[in-house]
Amino acid sequence: MARIIVIGSGFGGLGAAIRLAARGHDVHILEKRDKLGGRAYVYEINGFKFDGGPTVITAPFMFDDLFAAAGRKREDYIQFVPLDPFYRIYDHNKRYFDYNGDESFILDQIARWNPEDREGYQRFMRTTKAIFQKGFIELADKPFLHLWDMIKVAPDLIRMQSYLSVYHYAAQFIKDDFLRRVFSFHPLLIGGNPFDAPSIYAMIHYLEREWGIHYAIGGTGAVVAALGRLFEELGGTVTLNAEVKEILVNGRRVTGVRLADGTVLQADAIVSNADVATTYRSLIPEQHRRKYTNRRIERYKYSMSLFVIYFGTKRRYLDSGLVHHNIILSERYKGLLEDIFKKKRVAEDFSLYLHMPTITDPSIAPEGCENFYVLSPVPHLGSGTDWTQYAKPYRDAIMQFLESEYLPDLQANIIAEHYIDPLHFRDVLGSYLGSAFSVQPILLQSAWFRPHNRSEDFENLYFVGAGTHPGAGLPGVLSSSIIVENLIGDALETRRVQPVMKPVSA
């Protein structure tokens, strides 16, 4: 039995901790905040429960498999309900496109915009199935520790046209520009620019079509609570308000951690669910790092940040035309993304994701009230924006837009509110440059080119979460926990495990 410390309790950290505890290891989670969850923190304000981070649950089979690894059934801990539609996507004129898992329904939706694109969409779906088979089933839970691992899959990447962006890949099949946006926006969910993220990420659309999009009753925080309960049932230890200040090293091995209060904890292996860049730059002195120097870390391109407003109203908005997940795309879509990702400039316009979970689950708000979360992608702190001055005006602009276009009398009805900006991602969540999704998903920062799941400097330091392979998003970070379980298992001569995939329709 090995002593393993897990730094951070996001979904990657919780997944790894549960899998390793289920193998009989002595696993200790250290979480610097007062609750488990990492980015999936829950804000409780005036009777409202606001999910702080991920809200879109795809690949439910991965949660099923995580519980199965511990000899449990997910249904005994969490209730998932499918959503229909998955998203309602608005253009700048408030025309919208709904999509779900029903191909005939989607084809009818496409016909409202451009009937000629129906046949192209069917071809697009056939190709994304092949991309999913290779990119997710075969590669997502493989570690890519060696250059040869990348060379072996290079022919497949070329065959899948990974040199094309997701947007340009979709554009081969779809003529209408709004529909091109609809079928290529998904990289934004994992910190990528649809005009730069490689076409392999088109598989997200297939993943959603095949397994659906779900909501956990009680919110994403209920999933975190269930995983925490499972971990403790397995004999795991959780310490909250425990900030790691240093990872202790001896040669090419890590030996433990030093906490902010001076406590030293020894470990046979450490799994970091903290931001990879922050783990290296802030927790391990540079003289101990031959490969991951500060200069190398700073050369990566990092994802955008986010401005998120959580707000509750004293009235319902069931007549608003909104659904559970809403995406509102700016007229200046490509130009806005260039401002965010390339020019690092906060624009006057915005594209928004608007979450309205009480339409599915009224339990997370007081009776007769509505719970919302609105998110706007913004540049990371490399932009130089002074968010101490800019946050309030930016908040006001978003709320005024929502009030004038979607939610009448909104500001007079708000009875709970909290917002976070790039400074929160840096100072509270520990993300380098305040990036919301760590290393940006572009071709030369994918697979072997990403920070590895096992450190190149320390043989018993491992990484899970958004900044390592395969990347951000719930399926990505849960896949990283499988990789780390197998890597530690190999080191300790335990057997490999693979996820059990079963479509919800089966």
Image: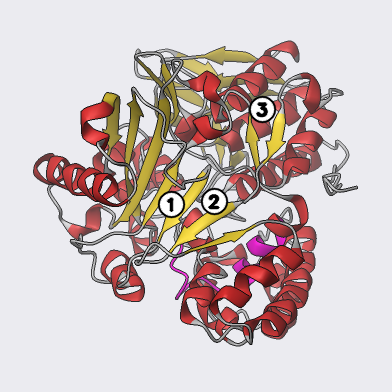
Mark 2: few, some, or many residues within 10 Å (few <14, many ≥20)?
A: many
Q: Amino acid at mark 3?
A: Ala
Residue 301 appears in the figure: yes
Residue 229 x, y percent position in the rendering: 67, 15
Say which residue label 2 marks. 472
Label 3 vs label 2, nearer the camera: 2
Q: What is the secondary structure assignment of the residue under circle 2?
A: loop
CA–CA distance between discs 1 and 3? 21 Å
Disc 1 versus disc 2: nearer the observer? 2
Instruction: Name the residue: 52% across, 45% down.
Output: 323
Q: Which residues are magenta?
A: 192-207
Asked if disc 1 and disc 2 are in contact, CB closer than 8 Å, the reply is yes
Determine the image quadrant of residue 346.
Answer: bottom left
Please name the residue that numbered disc 1 is placed on: 438
Q: Position of residue 150 (x, y in %)?
A: 67, 71
Residue at 74% across / 62% down in the picture? 139
Quadrant (top left, top right, bottom left, bottom right) of the N terminus: top right
At x 60% / y 41%, what residue is drawn? Answer: 462
Query: Which amino acid lies under the numbered mark 1 shown in the image of this protein?
Result: Ser
Hey, which residue is sitting farthest front in the picture?
A: 319
